[in-house]
Amino acid sequence: MIYSKIIGTGGYLPPMVFTNADWEKRVDTSDAWIVERTGIHSRHIASEAETASSMAVNAALSALAQAGIEAATLQMIIVATGTPEFVFPATACLVQKKLGITTDCIAFDVQAACTGFIYALSIADQYIKSGTIQRALIIGSELMSRLIDWSDRNTCVLFGDGAGAVILEASNEPGILSTELYSQGSFDELLTIENMQMGDHTSTNPQLTQVQNHNRPLDQMYPFIKMQGQKVFKIAVTKLGEMVQKSLQKHQLSVQDIDWFIPHQANIRIIKATADKLGIPMERVVCTVATHSNTSSASIPLALDVAVREGRIQRGQRLLFEAFGGGLTWGSALVKY
């Protein structure tokens, strides 16, 4: 049987760090309020010159170096992002160009909000298991700071920027054991970005108006995230718990068989509630939300890369990824690293 094996991980975080003290200067909030409700102490914010593709390339180069392979050997690139430079060409095509890949290589984007990395991982896994390709690069890259209302204290403190990457390779040894993907469009209004309808001429393309200028005037010309936090929290904890139990039962495993739980880094409350519901102690949860904040589709590969490079995650261990995002979408991946 052919498996998809993770042979390299990489991550990139913009140099600029925005602390809770910085938010105290902008909105009616405090470090204590933010930490208590989210577990976040700081987040990375991209510079004006940075883009989804530039961050993705940095994460990709890190993963390639760790795997010890050349970019030219990649046969597929999938970028999960909700913050691309352009509608088209795809961010993945820009990454392909910047990596200097001129050989045959499939490249496209996936947009499933915070679950995007799991969706992309699942797609690449199917291509490898079918024998269509041998090696794939999967990246989550997000510039969430350009989609927040910097005057809304309930959402602005939650998000940051960054990119994470993994390289998959065909192997006879177990790797990705299974993935679970779900969506429910009837919950679309619970987590959305307003003022970005195609053809709506009152909306402005954020890349053209340089909304990364954090002192911009706030008006209805800019898109921003709107979230019904309590409803999202309740649905997320319920759906994620059900999904993970289904995944474990499929392989006749229990939570005790999972070495590391690597959830989407939305906020500490959802992470703890989900871990408690599953019976997984926090000592076996990879948690980077305190310094990364919510980087959407980049959060799982970033957290994975941190734990791998710190030596916590070892070869042969079982990992469980899970994510929940706008759509609503949710998904999981059971992986033997």
Image (tube, grey):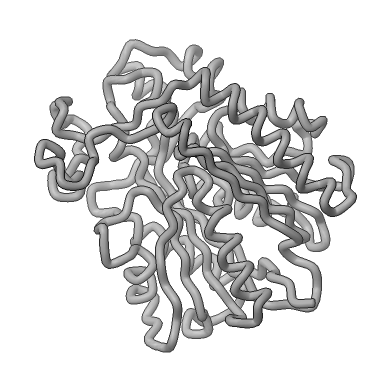
As rendered, which of 195 and 73 lies closer to the eye? 195
As rendered, which of 323 and 49 lies closer to the eye? 323
Residue 320 located left or right of residue 292:
right
Q: Name the quarter where the C terminus is drawn.
A: bottom right
Q: Looking at this rendering, what residue extends furthest in the left direction?
A: 201
Q: Position of residue 7 (x, y in %)?
A: 66, 70
Residue sitting at 60 percent across and 22 percent down? 234
Examine the image and state in which quarter residue 239 appears.
Answer: top right
Instruction: Reply above or below: 12 against 60.
Output: above
Residue sitting at 72 percent across and 48 percent down? 320
Residue sitting at 88 percent across and 43 percent down? 254
Instruction: Reply above or below: 285 against 303.
Output: above
Q: Looking at this rendering, what residue extends furthest in the bottom direction?
A: 103
As rendered, which of 63 and 234 lies closer to the eye? 234
Q: Position of residue 233 (x, y in %)?
A: 56, 24
As rendered, which of 227 and 160 lies closer to the eye? 227
Residue 164 located left or right of residue 144:
right
Q: Position of residue 118 (x, y in %)?
A: 58, 53
Q: Name the quarter where the N terminus is drawn.
A: bottom right
Residue sitting at 68 percent across and 70 percent down? 4
Number of numbered discs: 0
Instruction: Reply above or below: 67 against 9.
Output: below
Residue 256 located left or right of residue 143:
right
Q: Position of residue 48 (x, y in %)?
A: 23, 48
